[in-house]
Image (cartoon, rainbow, N blue to C red):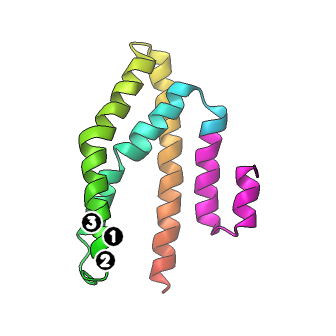
Amino acid sequence: GTPVREALKLAEAPPAAADFVAETWGIIESSPLHCQAAAFAFGREDLIPEMFDRVLRIEGSQDQLATFKDYLVRHIALDGEQHTPMAMQMLIDLCGDEAPKWAECAVTVRRAFAARHTLWTAVADRVARI
């Protein structure tokens, strides 16, 4: 029952993660359904399989990460074969040939990509300091 931004503060979430979640939640709270669908389809379902595939290619700690890597393989398969096509179809169903809706989607997707880029830049910076 706690508002998202307040819950993030109470949980002491890392600032970059809190900002990412807050931006994602902002899209959910304030964007029309077709824009929410676009952020979901392009900012998650279509993007994550390639991102996880890159994680699988990281060398070292193979035995320690076996269960995690099995999870990623399954996630990649589900997203790539089922979730992404369904998400794209949902977006097509919501926007049809309405160019203004597609334009709004593009703005929202850029917003989602920027938030994800900021998050992963912060993660990379943090890892580099370890």
Please name the residue shown 70% across and 67% down the image. Answer: 11
Residue at mark 3 = 70
Q: Label 3 vs label 2: CA separation?
A: 9 Å
What's drawn in magenta, residue-wise? 1-27
In the rendered view, tell whether residue 86 sits above or below residue 57: above
Q: What element carries label 3?
A: helix
Asked if disc 1 and disc 3 are in contact, CB closer than 8 Å, the reply is yes
The amino acid pointed to by label 3 is Asp
Please name the residue shown 23% across and 79% down the image. Answer: 59
Asked if disc 1 and disc 2 are in contact, CB closer than 8 Å, the reply is yes
Image position of 46 (left or right of 110): left
Q: Is residue 19 magenta?
A: yes
Q: Is residue 74 magenta?
A: no
In the orientation shown, which residue stands out farthest toward the top?
Answer: 97
Rendered image: mark on residue 65: 2
Q: Is mark 1 on a helix, strand or loop?
A: helix
Residue at mark 1 = 68
Label 2 neighbour load within 10 Å: few <14, some 14-19, many 20+: few
N-term-proximal mark, 3 vs 2: 2
Q: Label 1 vs label 2: CA separation?
A: 5 Å
Quadrant assignment, res 19: bottom right
